[in-house]
Amino acid sequence: MSDAELTDLSAAEAAREIAAGEIAAGELFEAYRARAAEHASGAGLNCFTWVAPGAPAEPSLGGDGAPGTQGGALQGVPLAVKDLFCTEGVPSQSGSKILEGYLPPYTATAVSRLTGAGASLLGKTNQDEFAMGSSNENSAYGPVLNPWDRKRVPGGSSGGSAAAVAAGLAPWALGTDTGGSIRQPAALCGIVGLKPTYGAVSRYGMIAFASSLDQAGPLTRDVTDAALMLRHLVVHDERDATSLSFPEEIVLPSAERLEGIRLGVPRELTSNSTGGDGDGEGIERGVLDAFRAALGRAEELGAEIVESVELPHAPHALSAYYVLAPAEASSNLARFDGVRYGLRAESPKDLVDMYTRTRHDGFGPEVKRRIMLGTYALSSGYYDAFYGRAQRVRTKIGEDFRTAFDQVDLIVTPTAPTVAFKLGEKTADPLAMYLNDFCTVPMSLAGIPAISIPCGLSDGLPVGLQIAGPAFSENRLLDAAHALERALGFDGSKARV
Amino acid sequence: MTDLEPVIGLEIHVQLKTRTKMFCGCELSFGDPPNTHTCPVCLGLPGSLPVANARAVHFGLMIGMALESELAPRSIFHRKNYFYPDLPKGYQISQYDEPLCLGGKLGDVRIHRVHLEEDAAKLIHVGSSGRIQGSEESVVDFNRGGTPLAEIVTEPDLRTAEQAGEWLRLLRTTLRQLGVSDVNMEEGSLRCDANISLRPAGSSELGTKTELKNMNSFRFIERGIRAEIARQEKLLRSGERVVQETLHYDPASHAITTLRSKEEAHDYRYFPEPDLVPIAIEQAMLDAAAEAMGELPAARAERLQRTLGLSADSARQLAFRSELGDYFEAALAAAVEPAPPAQALANWISSDLLARLQDGAEASGEGAGGESVDGDPNHSRVKPAAIAALVGLASAKQISVGAARQVLDRLVAEGGDPVAIVAAEGLAALDGEGDELAAIVAAALEANTDAAERVRGGNAKAIGPIVGYVMRETKGRADGGEVTKLVNEQLGI
């Protein structure tokens, strides 16, 4: 097989071929490694901040290693991992200068679940600093370029992961989603991205942004790969107190029809206004058109489209999110103080000087903005007005979804209000940038699973369709996404480099 | 000017004696080489997450039960945010407005709350000052970081330094008996801060308080509180005001200096710890805590007084030093005929025996009120059955008090069986009805004719040399009262 043929295989296909002895794991790894290295550390699409120096030695036996077995189910499949996952002895910088060159002494549970099943670490992918951003322009290691149009952003914060998968630099990638950081870049890069139910995947070893929202998940070329990765990710981890046992096995999706499925289309997240202060920023016409066309295909597959479903508090989700997430972040990022690891200011005058200059030099502007926002929101005398009120909104949003799921099986919206925008277009306007999360944040606050699949093009750029379901409904979600994916027949090959 | 009344409340931090730290699997240690008990969690490495120690929760519930607190069915952890090098995450995981235990009472002091949290690491400042400002270099030992702590906060019910010290000893005994902590002030497993204010006697309003920190022994707590009361009183009497601030007590110089003023107080930005789930107390946890409790000092004192008829003082003395109470009850259980009366046994243990053990013990390093391991009768050569037998013999007047003390000396030095010692040494009491003692008394009167004349003349105190003679001759076997009776008889008084 040629390198191009090798890298055309999906992760599930590659795993199958390796297990059958049709292709060699080392060849597959080297094919990807060479491609990844061309788009690393400022070169090409700048997807990777670290690429494995060579094929892993003898692939370790996964599974029980019993004689006659061919190792784990993912044996030999290369894996790209978002920078913020701690990987032992491999730079884990979370896109930040303050962690430049930081080598963790342990590996995140999510990563070791996949490598334990046989996957090989291909590289660490670029991201917005500490996962704060929607364009990957907040990385200390330079922006990632969108393989559909290199003048445009790949979305964020898992921008490097999304672009690498879309461009064929990795068969799949592990990302994280706090308010949309898997789904939005997946949408902007024309791939599949799944944010699982909060608690389904261990957060142990993920460098935290907002602990009550962060969740790891797959970025893949198709829905089957997303299911395959999720199957190996879910586990109850005793090292993460918020981790939960997934109540059923994740099965690879097979549905081709949507008969009997009620798809709710909440007005609040599907109109061309994003509510709030009526600043004219809404969901783009082209995005809405592609979304509506996809709904038409869903109906043809037998789905019932329910337009009357309501999420009355959803328009307030973004405001609540931008109180809660920065509040948690302001505390989570306090550990970067120059005392034990990472950057430390040179020859400080005293302790406060060391703290001040280390954090001044180590954090980028968006991170500083959110630390200040969060610190303010938690301050004595302001706590109830900000954090307390935002928590009440969060509770209301969870209730909205529960009510809605009494009426429908799944909820569908566009993933992002726009297609990929130009580099630099929104960097001067943080609020415009924050609106990227308008459709994805409500699910994050509710802790429910949501998947983004490519549903068409607008002006030659991919549009994402988001499907959300109740907690632990991933199997149903993946089945519906699989049926739609087949019917839509989205062609992502244009983005391959 | 009216009298000023001190109002004192205490905040006590107790390191819990769990096997592992509050939020990770590192073993607790004391005195091990620095940074040998650490992991990504207690070092606050990126990506690490806390998991609450169930054993610490169990101990917390036991403390709550002992202090008659209300145990919250649901309590949550908060983050207390501030920067300091001994705090690797930039926040301490503590409890805030939903603590594990609310209210309660120990002795005559009300408890405000009890909550769980993690200890900070240990900072060592190299250079002259001993504090972070002005030291050449500061190094951090994370072995202590993450040790489970219970913080116990009292209501302001204490009025004197001595009362505070006494109550703290009661708390210490209670916690020691629960087995939840080493409660050793020197090693820092028991730490105490005091909130102190003064008000006109009889007033029910509280004055401006200060918080006094760093009193690391019972002696210093009492001295520190006394010094702060005196400082506040001087201020108020000269018409000045007390400023709300946190103070540092220097045990060497007794100086009280400002640590930080109210304006400099941190805004800790408390918020619910999102990495942990609420502690939901189930019946099984309450049952386990109740089962592990055992009898507490206050209840034991009450029982000893009620069922054995001990005096209140004796009962408290035995109950509040649990090792004495244990020894006493073991002796009582091991007693054979002639059985010792409980009060006599208590007296012998807490005065004669203890005095001998403490004389033989090295001076304790723990200061006032500190128990010496060497002073523990359970660790002595005097078995509980032996002290019971000895007191039984003495109480039945089968040996004299003097002989009993001689036997006790032997027991302390060598151990052994009092009955055997009495027999071997011929210490059995001389019967006053027999001729032997009467003959010795007669000899004593003959040898001390001057004294005998004075006694006959009405000077009862002059009997000393006569009794002394008898005691020498009988090697102390004679009963003093019996001797006096015979002397008077023979002198015809």
Image (tube, grey):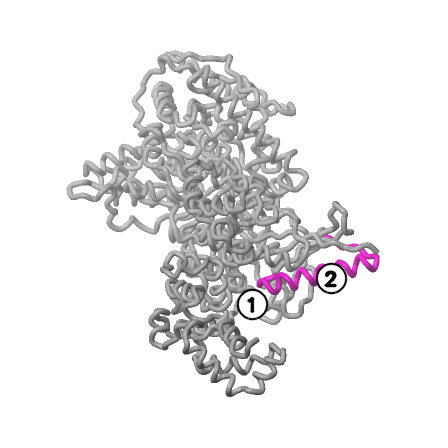
Q: Chain of mark 2?
A: B
Q: Quadrant of the image for the N terminus of chain B? A: bottom right
Q: Chain of mark 1?
A: B
User: Which residue position holds label 1?
Assistant: B367
Q: Which segment is the magenta one?
A: B215-244
**Residue A192, horizontal then vertical, whole percent:** 40, 29
**Residue A361, horizontal then vertical, whole percent:** 58, 53
Q: As drawn, is A76 to the left or to the right of B444?
A: left
Q: As drawn, is A24 to the left or to the right of A363?
A: left
Towards the viewer: B482 or B77: B482
For disc 2, the neighbor class at 10 Å (few under 14, some 14 to 19, many from 20) is some
Q: Tell me what residue is drawn at x 54 percent, y 39 percent.
A: B70
The answer to whether any part of residue B32 appears in the image is: no
Quadrant of res B418: bottom left
Label 1 is placed on what type of residue? Gly
The answer to whether any part of residue A266 appears in the image is: yes
Q: As drawn, is A282 to the left or to the right of A71?
A: right
Q: Which mark is residue A24?
A: none
**Residue B256, horizontal then vertical, whole percent:** 69, 63
User: Which residue position holds label 2?
Assistant: B230
Local SS, label 1: loop
Local SS, label 2: helix
Label 2 is placed on what type of residue? Ala
Q: Is residue B236 magenta?
A: yes
Q: Is residue B225 magenta?
A: yes
